[in-house]
Image (cartoon, rainbow, N blue to C red):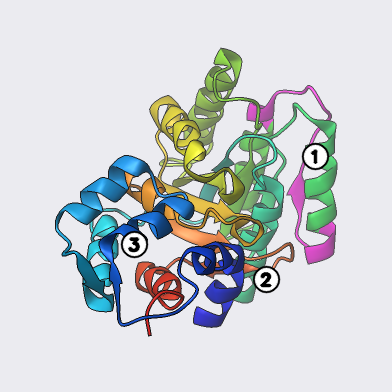
Amino acid sequence: MFNFLKRVLGKTNEAIKDIAPIKRKVIPKEDFEDILLEADVNYDLVERLLESLPKKINRIQAFNSLISIFQYDVEFKESTSKPFVEMIIGVNGAGKTTTISKLAYRYQQEGKKVILGAGDTFRAAAIEQLSRWADKLNIPIVATKQGNDPSAVVFDTITSAKAKEFDNVIIDTAGRLHTQTNLSEELKKMIRIAQKAQEGAPHRKMLILDGTQGSSSINQAKAFDDMIGIDGIIITKLDGTAKGGSLFSIADELKLPIFYIGTGEQPKDLIVFKANAYVNTILDEIFI
């Protein structure tokens, strides 16, 4: 876990080294502030974190301050329903399709039967990309033509999963900008149809956030949460950015569970997010 995170947060840790090139037992408060800001932690949050810290900060004090951000009540929404239906949400380019392949692979490795639903009918490329992943993983997929009603895909995928006793259903959704009213109505309809196909579905609505966007992705998340209610978050592309500290801001602002971090482009490149490991990986670059 630590080795994975160290690699994923590589660019963030390089940025930290630019500010604090030598590891120390204690660091001045000002240096700690600069490090957090450089890692893309929101300014207001940084100021709050510093309020209770002394002028010279040791590792334990830094850890206790940072870990407190993740100490909010969350429900890691699970269900005994079969099939367990997940709807994957996020803007174009966030890495939704690749993340779906990672989730599907993860469930496969747990011995579960998985089916995909290509619910992003707005882009032909999205249907093709998801179908390619389904082929690679040898997983069935329900797909239709570009422009067709995505709610029909939702209904057909869930009813097929029920009939064939699948364990997991993963449904892709369109990733147009969250400001568009038609996307909002489309997502709401997909949820209504899912509930008609199976009571309680979708059991989990998972938002994919692009780590390279840093704290700016928070507004996207708030918009989707207001729109349909988000149950959890997966962060992608952290390995390609120095904004690894944005997870602090995301957790602080949204108070939603962070389920996974994407660590690369392959289906196996997905790790469970652990706040302790995340904080310690960053502090390893600062303190002896």
Stretch in magenta? 135-152
- Note whether 285 is above or below 234 in the view shown: below
Q: Residue at x 42, y 80 (%)?
A: 23
Position of residue 150 measured from the top left corner of the image (x, y, whole percent): 68, 28
Where does label 2 land, which residue? Answer: 268
Answer whether residue 143 is magenta in the image.
Answer: yes
Marks 3 and 1 close (CB-CB < 8 Å): no
- The amino acid type found where label 3 is placed reads Phe
- Note whether 173 is above or below 109 in the view shown: above
- Note whether 288 is above or below 77 in the view shown: below
Distance between the alpha carbons at the discs numbered 1 and 2: 21 Å
Distance between the alpha carbons at the discs numbered 2 and 3: 34 Å
Position of residue 268 measured from the top left corner of the image (x, y, whole percent): 67, 71
- The amino acid type found where label 2 is placed reads Lys
- The amino acid type found where label 1 is placed reads Ile
Provide the secondary structure element on which disc 1 rests. helix
- Answer with mark 1 or mark 2, whichever residue precedes in sequence: 1
Q: Nearer the viewer, mark 2 or mark 3?
A: 3
Q: Nearer the viewer, mark 1 or mark 2?
A: 2
- Answer with mark 3 or mark 1, whichever residue precedes in sequence: 3
Where does label 3 land, which residue? Answer: 32
Q: Nearer the viewer, residue 200 or 57?
A: 57
Position of residue 234 measured from the top left corner of the image (x, y, whole percent): 52, 53
Answer whether residue 262 is magenta in the image.
Answer: no
Q: Residue at x 17, y 62 (%)?
A: 53
Q: Residue at x 39, y 55 (%)?
A: 34
When asked about the image quadrant of residue 105, the answer is: bottom right
> Which numbered circle lies on residue 127?
1
Position of residue 115 measured from the top left corner of the image (x, y, whole percent): 67, 54
